[in-house]
Image (tube, rainbow, N blue to C red):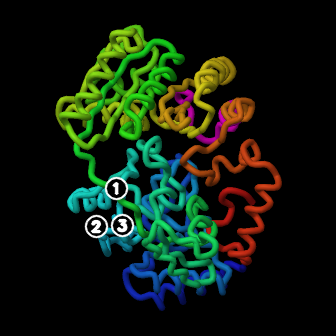
Amino acid sequence: MRAEFRGSAVEALASNLGPGVALTGADVPDRNRQDWSFMPATRPAAVFRPSSTQEVAAILRACHDAGLAVTPQGGLTGLCGGALPLDGGIALSLERMVGIEQIDPDGMTMTVLAGTPLEVVQKAADEAGLFFALDLGARGSCLVGGNLSTNAGGNRVIRYGMARDLVLGLEVVLPDGTVLPMLNRMIKNNAGYDLKQLFLGSEGTLGVITRAVLRLHPKPGCVAAALCVVTGYDKVVDLLATARRNLGPFLSAFEVMWADYWHQATVRVPGGKAPVAIGDGTHVVLIEMQGLDEDLDGARFDAWLQQQFEVGAIEDGAVARSLSDLSDFWGTRDAAAEFANPQVIGPHISFDIGLPIRRIEEFVTRSKPALLDRLGCHSVHYGHVGDGNIHIVAWVPGAAPQPLPTVSEIVYGIVRDLGGTVSAEHGIGLLKKPYLNHTRDEAQVDLMRRLKRCLDPHGILNPTKIFD
């Protein structure tokens, strides 16, 4: 579309939407021009901020007719460039669509608007005596719609599953403005295709999520946690096996921090502190259990930990005895959010990969020296591990994080060799697009493209993301 026609279409749409909904030209906020991927900021022609499904539908219908590219945006906490708008395109921010519409304690569901921050959902569930299981470090900034569009994972996947496992229904607006009111509230509903699954994890390329029916769980009666120092990755895997066997469904998190990560999180992060001394240990494991009864389940957790010390599975450790301790423990795991601080690491590339659990250490021992020897690239490692997910923070001191394609080639090449995935929970976006075929074969990618053409024949919705 010629620039003058595109500009007139944007102006007409902005005028029809009324004051406060559209921000154009110099009024486009800087925050809507980039996300947390460190990719260069873009220059969208406008940011539209609807407050209702009807406004979302009107925006998409008009953009569909005018051939305007639209990029849906949530909390802009993504790490793969999935929410970067095109130059001259439209950013569709869901930030004004905030609110919890219903909590059903009998059905254990919550109906929310897509722009509601994750932490608001967590607190609302807690106040209702229930529990929303999705949790990640960006909980205060990320929005539910973005969590679902990327099928976020987070800290408790080992017990509760990914974001798609915590959704019963969706309301979605298609690229042509058609509204799909799929707000199912029942666990059992086999009436035809489960269409919501098309949009969960599709990164805003097939439709815009505007509402969701979230699945809640009973509020835990007690939470127990420990930081365990372990020497040798084989002992990490063995500890996971015994935790699963002895704690069963109460095991809610199994987070592993390599010694290199632990140093950054507890020494270099301003205000960081080490609740346990790592000594000569190679890994620190954060184990969390959510039980029903403090006396019964808390005692079971303590007895299991004591047994692990006695058999030499754990070198040293600390047990949370208060909410403050629990917060400090998780603070070491969430410290990665502070790594962009120039006092810590500064600009870096974050990798999010999945591997068979037994092969994770093989990845680390291959990738770390390869990056350092070939590129002078440093790296630290941490991750959920209990669900096969590891994160890598990589940086070349003094260099900008982008472009460093050789870093990605090394990392994803090893992932391919080990039978893993280039994206465990962050999505593909722009950064991982060249490496999608490391994980999906051509037949799968071709089917993705056909689904995209079917639902978005004009290619207006989040174009250039995932694949061309």
Residue contact between numbered discs 1 and 3, judged by CB atoms under 8 Å:
no
Residue type, numbered disc 1: His
For numbered disc 2, what is the local secondary structure?
loop
Residue to which mark 2 is pinned: 105
Q: Nearer the viewer, residue 113 or 230?
A: 230
Asked if residue 449 is positioned above or below residue 46 in the image, the reply reads above
> What range is drawn magenta here?
395-410
Q: Which residue is mark 3?
A: 109
For the N terminus, the image quarter is bottom right
Magenta segment: does it hold 402?
Answer: yes
Task: Say if mark 1 contacts mark 2, CB within 8 Å.
Answer: no
Nearest to N terminus: mark 1 or mark 3: 3
The mark found on residue 152 in the picture is none
Gap between marks 1 and 3, in whole Å?
A: 9 Å
Residue found at x 73% / y 33%: 413
Visible residue check, residue 120: yes
